[in-house]
Amino acid sequence: MQGVSFSINEGEIFGLLGPNGAGKTSTLSAIEGLVKPGSGAIKVDGIDARARPGDARARIGVQLQSTSFQKELTIRELVRLYSGLYGASRSKSAADEHLAAVHLDEEAGKRFGQLSGGQQKRLALLIATVHDPPLVLLDEPTAGLDPQSRRQLWERIEHMRRSGRSVLLTTHSMEEAQSVCDRVAIIDHGKIVSLDTPAAERPITTAPGIGLILTSLLDADLRVQLRNGRALVVSLFLPMVLMYTLGAGKRGALFPASTRLAIAVGVGITSVAILGYTATVARDRETGVFQRLRVTPAPTWAIMSSRLAVQLLSILVMTVVVFIVGGVLLNLTLQPGAYALTMVVAVLGGAEFLSIGQAIVGLLKSADTVNAIGRLLYIPLFALGIVANVSIFGSTVETIARWSPGGALISMLAGAMAPAAWNSDNWWSVLVSLAYSLVFVAVGIRWFQWETR
């Protein structure tokens, strides 16, 4: 971009017209906060978007060129999610009213992928305006639509203008620019010419509270997790199988009941963090779900924290289920304090392995590569935890395995199930686990790529 400068008046439809690669999407991405301009200023309704990005995003509605949402959520749940992220009502009745306004009320129980192309565009436009923003950014909103759907969308854009909103849209169609826009700026090779009077400023409002944002994200992420049947089966099935296998034949003498239970929980934690979490994050990044969430007022740390919190809850639930089943199969009963300490250790171990998963998905862009590396590391990570409890491979291997992520986890779990025998090795395992967590999460956050391009 080279010195792009323009203003949009209240109640105006302003068009950026240009060929592919001219800089239209880059301009919108800078306003949305997806890319950081090297110089200059961006003001939205009088708010400095670079100094106060959350407040600026709260005043903007965005329809991206390629829209993607969580595939596990119904469109009613998507409307409720983004209503909360923008500070609007999250009630079911409010969501149904919004959907009825764009004639999608009969599709409320469907998922985004089940809608037609025209219906998907209507939903994306609804989500962009669910909080009644003064400025709406539309990136080639009618691309791929048939003539009838295109004209219907033009009518909805005109309705936004009549309601007092300002609209900035990009297009490479002269017909669309002439039919919809009040003013058009032609952009090519990152240059634009526009001499206009800035819009009058409205009273400045702030972004929604972090409590509402987190509630909305947690609600959506929890629903996604519950509907991910394969992840639930893997996180529960593998620990059960391993718990039974380690007790069969001569292996039963090598692995006491408490050790088998600890290993089973460790495998479940590894499954949730290394297979489930990394795959979901990589998929949502590649399909554009993260990009859509990032143009809301939700801070990026809140988006990731919500997902991590749901994964930790999944690990806790898995631990409880494994303990219940293991207690029956292995005829093992623990003291109440041991159960409580084990839950604490499960959270600590979950944080350790989720940080490893965060590092994997942060350093690798491709979802296929993330999945391949996750599967490649999965067996060694929990296998080292098993080896740490036997001496048949020699003292050197046993020592390495004991202080590996899996070994530290199994040591903590075994110690938690027998609090009276908790010793210095268990405390060292806690410190090692914390160190792994801090190092890997720092790597995963520092080098995390929000986009695949």
Image (cartoon, rainbow, N blue to C red):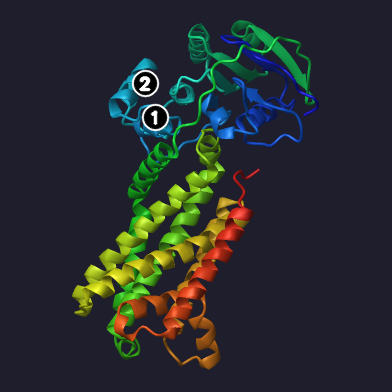
Pick whichever of labels 1 and 2 is earlier in the sequence: 1
Quick check: 3 left or right of 183? Answer: right
From the viewer's side, name the closer residue of 249 and 266. Answer: 266
Q: Is residue 364 visible?
A: no
Q: Estimate how packed mark 1 is, as few (under 14), some (14 to 19) or many (20 or more) residues with alpha carbons within 10 Å.
A: many
Residue at the image position 63 percent from the left and 12 percent from the top: 199
Per the image, the residue denoted by label 2 is 98
Q: Amino acid at mark 1?
A: Val
Query: For numbered disc 2, what is the local secondary structure?
Result: helix
Percent across and percent down for residue 59 are 53, 24
Residue 249 seen from this side: yes
In the image, taking residue 125 as reference, residue 184 lies left or right, namely: right
Image quadrant holding the N terminus, namely top right
Q: Callout 2, which amino acid? A: His
Q: Compare residues 24 and 112 and report the one nearer the observer.
A: 24
Question: In the displayed structure, would residue 140 be above or below residue 82?
Answer: above
Q: Are marks 1 and 2 in contact (CB under 8 Å)?
A: yes
Question: Which quadrant of the figure contains the C terminus?
Answer: top right
| Residue shown at 41% from the left, 29% from the top | 83
* Residue lying at 27% horizontally and 65% vertically, measured from the top left: 320
Q: Mark 1: which secondary structure?
A: helix
User: How far apart are the two marked residues, 1 and 2, measured between alpha carbons?
Assistant: 8 Å
Residue 129 image offset from top left, x and y in percent: 47, 21
Residue 201 appears at what percent x and percent y? 60, 15
Q: Residue at x 39, y 45 (%)?
A: 221
**Placement of 346 over or under 331, stated as above or below:** above
Q: Which residue is the site of mark 1?
A: 79
Q: Which mark is residue 17?
A: none
Horizontal side of 189 relative to 400 (left or right) equals right
Q: Foreground residue, 165 or 74?
A: 165
Residue 123 position by quadrant: top left
Q: Residues within 10 Å of mark 2 (few under 14, many from 20)?
A: many
